[in-house]
Amino acid sequence: MNIHEYQAKDIFRRFGIPVPPGDVATTPDEAERIARAYGTGVVVKAQVHAGGRGKAGGVKLARTPADARAAAQQIIGMQIKGLTVPKVLVTPAADIASEAYAGIIVDRASKRAVYMVSPAGGIDIEEVAATMPDKIMRLPVDPRYGLLPFEASRLGFFLYMDNAKLAREAAKIMRQLWQAFTASGGSLAEINPLVVTTGGDLLALDAKMVIDDNELDRHPDIAALRDETAEDPSEVAARRANLTFIKLDGNVGCVVNGAGLAMATMDLVKYYGGEPANFLDIGGSSNPEKVVNALRIITRDPNVKAILFNIFGGITRTDDVANGIVAATRDTPLTIPMVIRLTGTNEEIAVQILQQHGFSAMTDMDDAVQKAVRLATGGKAA
Amino acid sequence: MNIHEYQAKDIFRRFGIPVPPGDVATTPDEAERIARAYGTGVVVKAQVHAGGRGKAGGVKLARTPADARAAAQQIIGMQIKGLTVPKVLVTPAADIASEAYAGIIVDRASKRAVYMVSPAGGIDIEEVAATMPDKIMRLPVDPRYGLLPFEASRLGFFLYMDNAKLAREAAKIMRQLWQAFTASGGSLAEINPLVVTTGGDLLALDAKMVIDDNELDRHPDIAALRDETAEDPSEVAARRANLTFIKLDGNVGCVVNGAGLAMATMDLVKYYGGEPANFLDIGGSSNPEKVVNALRIITRDPNVKAILFNIFGGITRTDDVANGIVAATRDTPLTIPMVIRLTGTNEEIAVQILQQHGFSAMTDMDDAVQKAVRLATGGKAA
Amino acid sequence: MSIFIDRNTKLVVQGITGRDGSFHAKQMLEYGTCVVAGVTPGKGGQKFENKVPVFDTVADAVAATGANTSVIYVPPPFAADAMMEAADAGISLVVCITEGVPVLDMTRVYPYVQDRKARLIGPNCPGLITPGVSKVGIIPGRICTAGNVGVVSRSGTLTYEVVYQLTRAGIGQTTCVGIGGDPINGTNFIECLQAFEADPDTKAVAMMGEIGGTDEQQAAEFVRAHMSKPVVGFIAGQTAPPGRRMGHAGAIISGSAGTAAEKLDAFKAAGMGVAQRPADFVTLLHERL
Amino acid sequence: MSIFIDRNTKLVVQGITGRDGSFHAKQMLEYGTCVVAGVTPGKGGQKFENKVPVFDTVADAVAATGANTSVIYVPPPFAADAMMEAADAGISLVVCITEGVPVLDMTRVYPYVQDRKARLIGPNCPGLITPGVSKVGIIPGRICTAGNVGVVSRSGTLTYEVVYQLTRAGIGQTTCVGIGGDPINGTNFIECLQAFEADPDTKAVAMMGEIGGTDEQQAAEFVRAHMSKPVVGFIAGQTAPPGRRMGHAGAIISGSAGTAAEKLDAFKAAGMGVAQRPADFVTLLHERL
């Protein structure tokens, strides 16, 4: 789960990390009021779950409250990578002497959380890794010990080699960031940039955290940070229905059980000349209700020209899926064509149910995908 | 550092372990008042840093407030293994259905803290180990993981094999005890007995904790629990003077640098027919003040008939020791003979200082010990 | 022959009295798996289906039955503890089906299991099956048939799809292993490929990867350097957008790393067969057997 | 020859700018120990005594100087971290002089150091010395002389006393090792005995134990089963009362376990020479050399 910069800063602050003050505005009026209260120049920053805010014009310096108002006016409601910006963070502008990077990610190769720090901050860490690999220190953390004091010290001295005071303060921040990361069930925590102000103080000027969805049950306070106004409405609806759904731009709506098969189905749509409209996994335990919700969400997308079911019954009972299709189309019949492929557990019963209600079912995945693509493109593809 | 039962129970309570209520009395009046307030039969328990309280008559059941008063009268001030009982714990008597044992000790062999539990509680666990070894489960805890839930569960089911409810509750107590132990810097934590009441509840009826002296700086709240009224006054004085001192019953007072050499010196006193009056280690860094304090503490013991210095100068400068001897005897000359052996760092200077003040010094350990024993026993031994 | 499970597999089912555990324990018994014990704390002494003894702890189950393999169907908050319990009790193959185990839990579980020399498969995996011999997990038995192709995959139903197509085309399997879709799991592609290479009955391997991470790239390098047997690979997620988690916690393209294109290139560079779609496995394996 | 330290020992001193660290670093330099680096976070770039470079971290020191041995003089709250830092930086012999390290810290340090294949000596120990070659720790150099007796001990000044008497009697030492007086330490008697047995120059061993624990009993069993060289043992604390800690955290008789009598019996049963008093080492070793 993504959280906003201001939320990550609240967490950081709780763990003692120095972060600048800041307040959230959802209207230009509020932004102006906040800027006036600070009485200094401010930065107005889009709070949105997408990278590259700066380049997209989502971060603006404002010298006066009126500027802040104007900046908020421009930013709130703008689209960044397909997401609407619901709010801005208004925070006093800082005088920056230098910028560094500090982050923790879960590394699949070492099977550990890994610290990455670089004295070259403020830019994308991948870029640093590609162009100045010796400017990055990677430090896998043994979860059984946590970040040890000497490890924090190594990170601190790597960042501020020539300044023992800053190195020691940075080491402390490294330990605090580790605490914030583990205590929140993070899968990523980042300070970029970590700045030295012209006054010589360290400050986490930007903050990013991603929370492991699987940790949310353990951390209700963190789960409560979810901002549905910042998400795609169809994905919010899908999550509420316990579906895993990601909206794409294609024309073939896909309903599949299992993530791997769902991806393979999308790929096959593309292979046969179509474009998948979504990723949708109904999961292992198939109750008819899930199928009803899935159809409802997919048909809301005007781009979808055909619907493709691809169900391989293992734990999933294909008759449940068939019943769901029947239930969903009983009251509001579909206005676009649908191709149903199912095989596996209770396949015969499922086919019978579908046939009784005027649907036909296929058993071969390639045949089904080709047919769906043909229907979606009006026969132009494949 | 030893703490009292009532203090250990306070800690246990803070970690959620079910312990019976109880209040501390330092006078029979208080004991009576507490018993009256409970309005039930009570147990009056000596709070003293010595084992075998029960056998020594330090634990008494009292049916009425008057009985409680009488019991406190008997117990407060009594001697148990050389220590005076300064106070009693007055606690409601419990109806006991069964008694078990649970404890954590630091095990030198596995280099870990080890859990030990036994369904045969209420008696000395060493006795259980000797007579019913299959009634004990030993579980070394990996400090990098702490007590894992499945380990706590194994302990719980070992204690209450036939009762899943009790097993699960005990597992929870095992986790809480582990937390209490590690959070307090313990070197021992014990519940003996852990009882099931006739009402079917688990209760830590007795509690014992020993704190690692080396952890006290980290845990000022625990360090504050030290009860000097429960310690030998000469040992209290020694600790304040940063000396490691243990009082014994012999007649040769020993002042040595280093624990191993101190023990070896005591052993040599015994070898030559004397009896050491104490263990005393002045430690590595020798300032004259320490020597002054050491002599003051030793000469307070009327049993001491001769004093033996055995100093091997490594880090310890023997001239510092010589200066200490001179300073200590300047104002209050000794009334008993003293034998000084020193060798090592600055030995020549030390000998000179001593000779200038009328003391002689020896260099051979055996010679010095023999002489001290001879002087203490009036020439009867060796 | 087979890898990881065979006629000597003696299985304990952790969470045998739960909804999923009891359902699949029955399925495994029906398939012929040697299920010797179940574990549910507090239900020790009961019998599952009137024949499988249930214990309070895995240690008790191992002591009483000599179980050497465990399969875990417990809810996510307890799965890490269950994996560690199994490894600590001396189980040598631990298969965790549970989906939704926190990844930081897995960073602790992995060294624990390693220290005890146990093999962990999963979590968030369908388990494994040696057709006709033993099934540990949830792979539907009827879609498999004994033969000489090893199957290893990061996904569940996609594996079923491929195995189903192989079986229909007359290509049987030695063992099918689902290693799971989480970013940190116990056994990776390389360890499975190594085992298939060592298994005399396996003549070729079908491998299904996904976007995310570099496991497939490393596996391809292993194939190039160490495999004498032909391997055919597939990557799901060619149409996945970057930065979005495609269902599986591990199926996510971070920045420019972990794309399907990158993985398919690695397969080609290693001389592997590359299946553009699941159905290609049949033709590519036929060519190589 | 010698054990653990020799002419190839390249030493880094952790806490070199502290009170104890600087004093003993000078002593070691004077003795001829190859002190290649010091570490004090924040003092990187300085020179100690105008010649030994100081670094901020042990990793930096190892990278720049190739140090293979570390000696630690840092205050107790930081000692555990210092030991782990040394082991993590690739130091193969870590000697911790610091007294007062919490025992629960040591339960964490021990597996950490083990995992990194480093040898830890101490904490709360005087270190070790190979007379005439290298001194790591605080054992006074002038009481030692090169020879063919290995010395291993749980204590500091008692070791000095015995070594002093040996030297005066013309009995030289290969290496003297103080393993420390804490209940949990890195290297025990058996590992030292093993090393002395393997060292061609060591002809006999003097071993000084104390009350508390069972290390000496196990060492005696090792002597009986695996040592060809004569070993003479001593136990300090014959007059110690049970249940009281005799200075050293490890020197405590718990219940009936860890008494001097028990340990001396084990020595006798193993055919070891038993020194009743420190001076006996001289005669008993003379008989055996």
Image (cartoon, coloured by chain):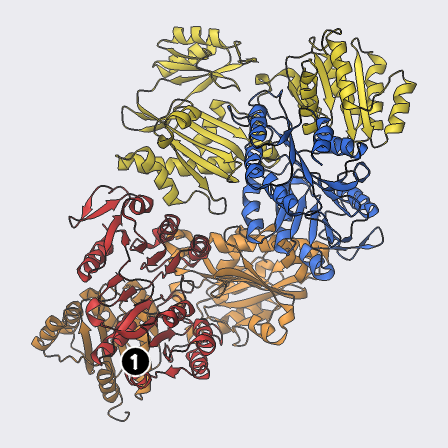
Chain colours: A yellow, B orange, C blue, D red
Left or right, residue C147 beside residue D196? right
Task: Name the residue furthest left.
Answer: B356
Q: Quadrant of residue B325?
A: bottom left
Q: Foreground residue, A325 or B77? A: A325
- Residue A97: tell me if it is visible: yes
Position of the C terminus of chain B, as image quadrant, is bottom left
- Residue C269 position within the rendered picture, expressed as x and y whole percent measured from the top left: 55, 30
Left or right, residue A308 beside residue A117? right
Position of the N terminus of chain B, as image quadrant, is bottom left
Q: Quadrant of residue C97?
A: top right
Mark 1: few/some/many CA within 10 Å (<14, 14-19, 20+): many
Q: Residue at x 75, y 16 (%)?
A: A370
- Residue B360 position within the rendered picture, expressed as x and y whole percent measured from the top left: 13, 80
- Residue B234: tell me if it is visible: no
Q: Foreground residue, D62 or A80? A: D62
Q: Residue at x 54, y 76 (%)?
A: B55
Residue hosting label 1 = D278
Q: Foreground residue, C260 or C40? A: C260
- Residue A157 position within the rendered picture, expressed as x and y whole percent measured from the top left: 32, 37
Q: Quadrant of residue B358?
A: bottom left
- Residue B208 position within the rendered picture, expressed as x and y whole percent measured from the top left: 51, 63
C125 versus A2 height, above or below = below
A53 versus C158 height, above or below = above
Helix, strand or loop status at disc 1: loop
Left or right, residue A65 beside residue B95? left
B158 versus A140 height, above or below = below
B304 versus A131 height, above or below = below
**What subunit carries mark 1?**
D
The amino acid type of the residue labelled 1 equals: Pro
Label count reads 1
